[in-house]
Amino acid sequence: MSTPRISNNANELLVTDIGTLAVVPPGPLPGRRMRDVTMLRDAALAIEDGRIAWFGPAADAPDFKLQHRLSAGGGCVIPGLIDPHTHIPFIGDRSGEFVRRVGGESYLSIMESGGGIRVTTAAVRRASEQQLVDANLPRLRRMLALGVTTCECKSGYGLDPEHELKQLRVIRTLDGLQPIDLVPTYLGAHALPAEFEGRADEFIDTIASEELLSLIAREKLARFCDVFCDRGAFDVDQSRRVLRRAAKAGLTPKLHADELAQIGATRLAGEVRAISADHLELIDDAGIEVLKNAGTIAVVLPGTSFYLGIEHCDARRLIEAGLPVALSTDCNPGSSMIESLPLIMNIACCQLRLLPAEVLAACTANAAAAIGLHENTGAIAKGFDADLTILDAATLESWFYTPGRPRVRSVIKCGRIVYGGGLSP
Ligand code: NIG
Ligand code: FE
């Protein structure tokens, strides 16, 4: 499919003919406040210096002398989508595991039989930086065409200092090659590599050495440090050691928690004041309270439960309990080979019973909060980055009503049209 690429280099723009502007307030939006999205009909939005300068009813628009205009053609305009949890960049194919799972084997038993993360680790270790860039750039371009303007990316398939650093450098390279803003996370403690079998504590000392963590922080190769704290991965004590050291080095903690087994991971997320706790399929009441008290964002990944055929996280329960919930693809080659945030949004709506406004808040304002960017992006607010996705549906409801139908017309990143078209003089 070819899309006209027209860019307004001046990063100032007047967006006209907006059927509905979905005005998402800045995050984090806890609990029922996720519904506080105002639908403004027949709107316009002005961008200056890449930021939102004005928005309101088109009839009230001041006489902007902006050089460039873009008609939304009556479509709905939403904040650019934010994917706050992906395992990009990766390489290799695990479709055999996918079919084994469909046939009844579990993710854990495939992992225990030598499949899983170690398979992708071997492929990533073998690949050059250029090969990793080439394998992932098209993926990011496809995500852009689905309306994504910001994306968190994790290492975690190198599992030794050399290859973890390689993955982090690839994220930096990819960030410079395409319009989506990439926010890097160090996930050295993702799995135990074969050469450390039976020596998990030694592995932790290698992957979370003071030297390595401070290098990553100093070179700004990552902002966050994540750990896979679960049965078959790392226990609470090991995860605590990694995250405490990382925080000391200047990396903010995140956690894969309560996905495969309930081992107390969410309580650790609260204890280390993680910015987000992710997965949460098996979260308990105590875990919910802990996250609330710590101000941690709950990142729910319904693509993973969909793909693995396990119970979804009860996101409705988290929202009713007053937590700010974000949604993400968890895009990875094992448990969620899903790049499409709109697909995740549809699963959240149809199967987790989240309302369209809640889902939108989860993929914008709250997703921004899960990666510490909520003061600049993820909302329609004056002074915020002009990151916008224009739909060919007139309302938010009519977009959610048609799952699977590609409906992104244009994407604007910091005031520049980076996907779709076009400009009207
Ligand atoms: O988020 N849970 C841990 N890691 C990934 C799976 C990674 C893989 O299987 O390659 C996840 O589900
Ligand atoms: Fe993950």
Image: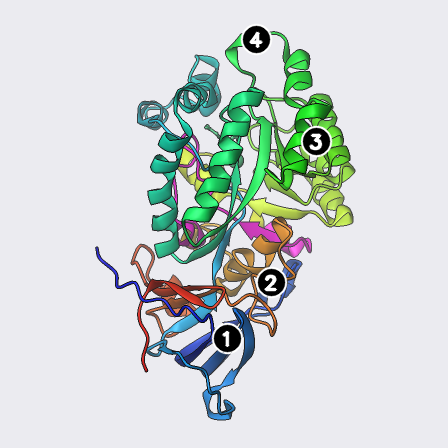
Q: Earlier in the sequence, mark 2 or mark 4?
A: 2
At x 54% / y 21%, what residue is drawn? 162
- Mark 4 burial class by Cα count in 10 Å: few <14, some 14-19, many 20+: few
| Mark 2–mark 3 distance (CA, rounded to whole Å) | 37 Å
- Mark 4: which amino acid? Glu
Q: Distance between the residues labelled 2 and 1?
A: 25 Å
Image check: 130 left or right of 163?
A: left
Residue 205 in the image: above or below residue 44? above
Query: Does 266 sit left or right of 122 as displayed?
Result: right
Contact check, label 2 and label 4, Cβ < 8 Å: no
- According to the picture, the residue beneath numbered tag 4 turns out to be 197
Instruction: Identify the secondary structure beneath mark 3.
Output: helix
Kind of residue at badge 3: Ser
Instruction: Say what amino acid the circle numbered 2 marks.
Output: Met
Residue beneath disc 3: 214
Q: Nearer the viewer, mark 4 or mark 3?
A: 3
Instruction: Assign a secondary structure to mark 1.
Output: strand
- Within 10 Å of the Cα at label 3, are there few (<14), some (14-19), or many (20+) other Cα atoms? some
Q: What residue type is labelled 1?
A: Ile
Q: Does residue 22 show up?
A: yes
The residue at which mark 1 appears reads as: 47
| Residue at point 35%, 23% (across, down) | 97
Closer to the eye: label 4 or 1? 1
Q: Residue tagged by mark 2?
A: 34
Name the colour scheme: rainbow
